[in-house]
C-alpha cells in the first residue's frame, strides 16, 4: 500500500512527520537530506519515535534512550531489543510517499495486548 505522507517542502531537515496508520509510521528528513520511514512505535514500550531525537541516521526513543537506525530499523542497545519495521520512501512531484512494508511489525507488549483485546494501541 502506498500512502502520501506530506510535501517534501513541508518537512524541514532534522524533523519528522507522523502518519496515523495502523500501526503509526514516522517519516524522517535527516540533516543530510535523506528521507526515511519506520514504524513510529518503539519496540520496547509504547512511545512515539517521531517525538525522539534525530541524529544522523539514528532516532533516539524519548523514553529510555534506545536508538534505532533509520536505514535498517536495528536497535543499538537495550531496553529495545527488536528492530522497528522500515518502509520504502518514494518522492514524486515533490510529495513524499510511503510504501508500507508487508513484514509484521515489532510492537511492544503493551500495544500487542491492546490489539488482542480490541482496544487501540
Image (cartoon, grey):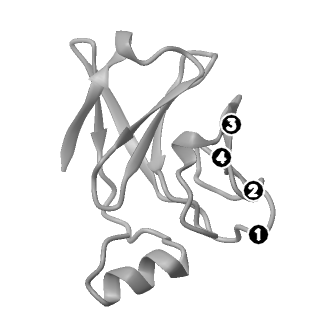
Q: Nearer the viewer, residue 113 or 34?
A: 113
Q: Nearer the viewer, mark 4 or mark 1?
A: 1
| Looking at the image, residue 92 lies above or below residue 114 | above
Mark 1 or mark 3: whose residue is earlier in sequence: 3
Q: Residue furthest right?
A: 77
Tell me where residue 81 sits by quadrant.
bottom right
Q: Are marks 4 and 3 in contact (CB under 8 Å)?
A: no
Q: Are marks 4 and 1 in contact (CB under 8 Å)?
A: no
Q: Are marks 1 and 3 in contact (CB under 8 Å)?
A: no
Mark 4 or mark 3: whose residue is earlier in sequence: 3
As drawn, is 111 to the left or to the right of 33? left
Give the residue displayed 36% in from the left and 35% down from the top. 89
Q: Are marks 2 and 4 in contact (CB under 8 Å)?
A: no
Give the residue displayed 68% in from the left and 49% down from the top. 62
Between the C-alphas of marks 4 and 1, the distance is 15 Å
Instruction: Determine which of the numbered discs, if any, sits on residue 53 in the image.
Output: 3
Q: Are marks 1 and 2 in contact (CB under 8 Å)?
A: yes
- Give the tally of numbered discs: 4
Q: Nearer the viewer, mark 4 or mark 3?
A: 3
Q: Nearer the viewer, mark 2 or mark 4?
A: 2
Q: Which residue is mark 1?
A: 79
Residue 67 at x, y percent in the picture: 72, 50
Between the C-alphas of marks 1 and 2, the distance is 6 Å
Give the residue displayed 68% in from the left and 39% down from the top. 58
Q: Nearer the viewer, residue 45 or 39?
A: 45
Q: Which residue is mark 2?
A: 66
Q: Which residue is mark 4?
A: 69
| Looking at the image, residue 53 lies above or below residue 64 | above
Q: Secondary structure at mark 3?
A: strand
Between the C-alphas of marks 3 and 2, the distance is 11 Å
The crowding category of the residue bearing disc 2, from other C-alpha atoms within 10 Å (few below 14, some 14 to 19, many at least 20), is: many
Identify the image quadrant of the C terminus: bottom left
Amino acid at each position: 500500500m502506498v500512502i502520501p505522507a506530506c510535501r517534501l517542502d513541508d518537512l524541514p531537515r532534522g524533523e519528522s512527520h507522523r502518519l496515523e496508520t495502523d500501526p503509526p509510521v514516522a517519516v524522517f528528513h535527516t540533516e543530510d537530506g535523506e528521507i526515511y520511514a519506520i514504524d513510529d512505535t518503539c519496540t520496547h514500550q509504547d512511545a512515539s519515535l517521531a517525538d525522539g531525537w534525530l541524529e544522523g541516521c539514528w532516532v533516539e526513543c524519548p523514553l529510555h534512550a534506545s536508538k534505532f537506525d533509520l536505514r535498517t530499523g536495528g536497535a543499538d542497545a537495550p531496553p529495545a531489543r527488536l528492530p522497528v519495521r522500515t518502509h520504502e520512501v518514494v518522492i514524486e512531484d515533490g510529495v513524499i510517499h510511503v510504501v508500507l512494508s508487508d513484514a509484521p511489525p515489532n510492537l511492544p507488549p503493551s500495544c500487542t495486548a491492546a490489539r488482542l483485546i480490541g482496544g487501540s494501541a
